[in-house]
Image (cartoon, rainbow, N blue to C red):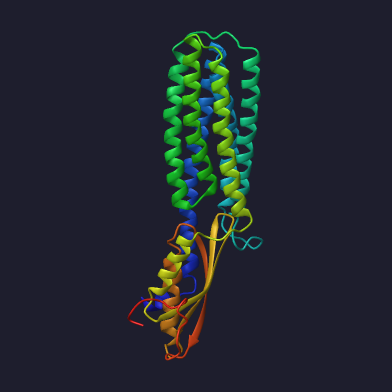
Amino acid sequence: MPALMREDNLVEAKRGHQLIEKREISRRFTLLNLIVNAVLMVVKGAVGVMTGSLAVTADAVNSLADTAYSLVLLVGMRFSLQPADRGHPQGHRALEPLISLVIGMAIAFVAWELVMRGIDGLRNPGEIETSVWPVLVLLFSMAAKAYVALRARRSAAQMHSPALAAVGTDAAADVLASLVALSGYLAAILGYPVADPVFSLLVALFVARTAVEVLWENIGYIVGRSASAEIEEQVREIACSEDLVRAVHDLKTYFRGPELHVSFHLEVNRNESLIAVHDAEQRVRLALLDIPEVDDVSVHIDPVPGDEPVHPVDACSNPKR
C-alpha cells in the first residue's frame, strides 16, 4: 500500500473517476428535466387556450422558457464535463456558471412577460370557461415539478453543480407558481375574474425572486469567491488528521467555476522521512477530494525543527503532537 500511495497519478486518477460519475449524474437528470418541461409546456398550453385562463397560460409560458433552458442545460453540461485537455488543463467546468446565468436571465425574462400579461388582464379581463382540466393539469404540474426539484437538489449535491441547483430552485418556485395559478383559476370561476390576472402577477413575483437568487449565486462563482468558513474548517481538520502535521497555514480557497481549489502549507518535523511526509500529503489530498466542492488541492510542505514553537492560530490541536 505505501508504494501505491506514492504513485503521482493517484490524485489525478481519483479526479478523473469523479468526473465520470458527474457526467453520468448530469446526463440522467438533464434528460429527465427536458422531457418533463416539454410535456408540461404542451399540456398547459393546450389547456390555457381551451379554457381562456390567463393564469394557466402564464404558467405555460413559464414551462416554455423552462423547456428552452433545459435544452441549453443538456448541451452545456455535456461540454462543461469534458475532461481536461491541452488547451484547458483545469477542465471545462468554468462554463457551468455561464450556463446558470443563461438560466437566470431566461427566468427573469419570463417574470417580465408574466407581469405584462397580468397588467393586460387587469385592463381587459377575458371570459374563463369552467372546466376540470386546468385543475388536473396544474396539480399534475405541481407533482412533476416537485419531483424535478428533489432530483435536481440531490444531483446538484452529489456533483456540486450550480446549474443543477439553479434548476432545482426554479422547479421549487414553479410548484408555488402553479399553486398560485390554480388559486387564481378557482377564484375566477367562483365569480372573481380579477383574481386571475392578480394571481398571474403573483406568479411573476415568484419567478422574479428565483431569477435573482440564481444570478447572484453564479456571479459569485464567476468572480472566484472563497469557500464558506465551514468548508475551510473542514479542510483544516482533514489536514491536521495526519499525526506528523504540526500546523496548517496560508490556507486559501477559491472557486474556478463551480469547482473549489484549495492550497495551504503543512508544517512537519524536518527529521521525518521524505517517504512518510509524501504519503501523508497524498492521504490529505485524497481525503480532501471527498468534499463535494473540492476539485484540486495544492500542498506545500514546510520542514521545521521539532522543538520550534508553533503559532497558536496555525497549530493542529491533536494532543499527540
Q: Is residue 314 above or below residue 304?
A: above
Residue 198 is drawn in which quadrant? top right
Q: Position of residue 111 (x, y in %)?
A: 61, 31
Q: Position of residue 65 (x, y in %)?
A: 60, 31
Q: Residue furthest left?
A: 320
Q: How many marks?
A: 0
Please report the residue visible at 60 percent of the width from the left and 55 percent of the height from the top.
92
Q: Position of residue 313 (x, y in %)?
A: 47, 76
Please report the residue visible at 44 percent of the width from the left and 66 percent of the height from the top.
233
Residue 224 is drawn in which quadrant? bottom right
Q: Is residue 88 above or below residue 208?
A: below
Task: Classify residue 139 as left or right of residue 200.
Answer: left
Q: Nearer the viewer, residue 91 or 271?
A: 271
Q: Nearer the viewer, residue 315 or 103?
A: 315
Q: Position of residue 45 (x, y in %)?
A: 56, 20
Q: Is residue 219 above or below residue 113?
A: below
Q: Which quarter shows the N terminus?
A: bottom left
Please report the residue visible at 49 percent of the width from the left and 40 percent of the height from the top.
168
Q: Which quarter shows the C terminus?
A: bottom left
- Residue 87 visible: yes
- Residue 60 visible: no
Q: Is residue 238 above or below residue 105?
A: below
Please report the residue visible at 52 percent of the width from the left and 16 percent of the height from the top.
47
